[in-house]
Image (cartoon, rainbow, N blue to C red):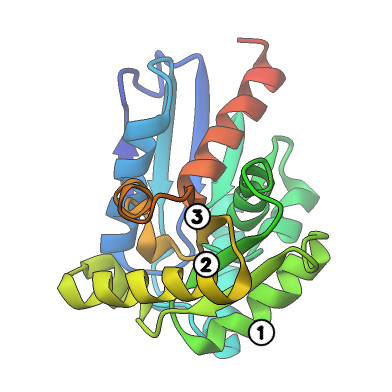
């Protein structure tokens, strides 16, 4: 399934073309990512947002990842020719695999968000969805060289529930951000799930602290990479 995103340009008229892959099979998450692309991309950049058919609606365990990753890699392989690519999940799913055969940059949302958050504070925290995601995110943070400055906390909400939203989701996010500030000393927060896309601005205003939307960070970085690659 795919959603065409054209903030002000079509794929035919755009100066830069980005392919965005949501590795899970949840159309609501794909819609959130599409909305984010519309909100942050330049008028001359188009993006196409896809998710693989048959992928788990939430990627919350190693078993989910084992199903989702080959589907995401296959999807990437069937869409060559873009100026940049984004993996729209807080994981490195398909990033290494995609970089082996894609000729354009492929952006990892976790890598992009950590790079941005480090500009705001010496200590940062990632707020993700469920506890099963925490070990994998900690390993990824360490691999990205941020293990000594970054903590990871789960809000206790599923990816699908996060995407759906509601008062209880907001309450749990608020409590987790408060814990990250009070106990971890975090000066900036990263939202570590595609299901949390679109919430950063409201959370930042409510808590008076920079809150980084990992998907928006990845889209912005991909647009920069596409500009460098195309010279436009």
Using a 10 Å C-alpha cutoff, classify the residue at mark 3 as few (fewer than 14 neighbours), some (14 to 19) or many (20 or more). Answer: many
SS under mark 1: helix
Q: Give the numbered dot on residue 88.
A: 3
Q: Residue 107 appears at what percent x and percent y?
A: 64, 46
Whether the residues at callouts 2 and 1 have beta carbons within 8 Å, the answer is no
Q: Residue 132 appears at what percent x and percent y?
A: 54, 89
Q: Residue 216 appears at what percent x and percent y?
A: 46, 43
Q: Give the numbered dot on residue 149.
A: none
Q: CA distance from mark 3 to mark 1?
A: 19 Å
Mark 3 against mark 2, which lies toward the viewer? 2
Tell me the quadrant of the picture where the N terminus can be found. bottom left
SS under mark 3: loop
Q: CA distance from mark 3 to mark 2?
A: 26 Å
Using a 10 Å C-alpha cutoff, classify the residue at mark 2 as few (fewer than 14 neighbours), some (14 to 19) or many (20 or more). Answer: some
Instruction: Looking at this view, name the residue that lies furthest to the front.
Output: 182
Q: CA distance from mark 2 to mark 1?
A: 20 Å
Find disc 2 in the rendering and name its residue.
181
Residue for point 43% across, 75% down: 176
Residue for point 41% across, 27% down: 46
- Left or right side of 91 for 149: right
Q: Is residue 56 above or below residue 220?
A: below
Mark 3 against mark 1, which lies toward the viewer? 1
Is residue 81 visible from the viewing direction of this image? no
Please report whichever mark, 2 or 1, sits nearer to the chain's N-terminal start: 1
Query: Which corner quadrant of the image does residue 137 belong to?
Result: bottom right
Find disc 1 in the rendering and name its residue.
135
């Amino acid at each position: 399934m795919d959603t065409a995103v054209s903030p002000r340009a079509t794929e035919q008229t755009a100066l830069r073309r980005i392919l965005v892959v949501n590795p899970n099979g949840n159309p609501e998450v794909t819609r959130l990512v599409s909305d984010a692309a519309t909100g942050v991309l330049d008028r001359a950049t188009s993006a196409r947002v896809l998710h693989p058919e048959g992928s788990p609606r939430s990627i919350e365990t190693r078993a989910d990842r084992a199903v989702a990753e080959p589907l995401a890699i296959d999807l990437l392989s069937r869409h060559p020719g873009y100026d940049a690519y984004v993996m729209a999940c807080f994981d490195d799913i398909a990033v290494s695999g995609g970089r082996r055969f894609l000729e354009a940059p492929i952006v990892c949302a976790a890598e992009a968000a950590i790079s941005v958050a480090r500009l705001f504070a010496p200590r940062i925290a990632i707020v993700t969805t469920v506890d099963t995601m925490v070990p994998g995110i900690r390993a990824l943070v360490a691999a990205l060289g941020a293990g000594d400055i970054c903590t990871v906390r789960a809000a206790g909400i599923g990816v699908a529930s996060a995407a759906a939203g509601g008062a209880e989701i907001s309450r749990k996010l608020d409590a987790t951000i408060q814990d990250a500030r009070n106990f971890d000393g975090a000066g900036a927060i990263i939202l570590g799930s595609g299901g949390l896309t679109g919430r950063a601005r409201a959370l930042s205003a409510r808590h008076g602290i920079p809150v980084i939307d990992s998907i928006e960070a990845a889209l912005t970085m991909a647009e920069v990479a596409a500009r460098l690659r195309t010279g436009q």
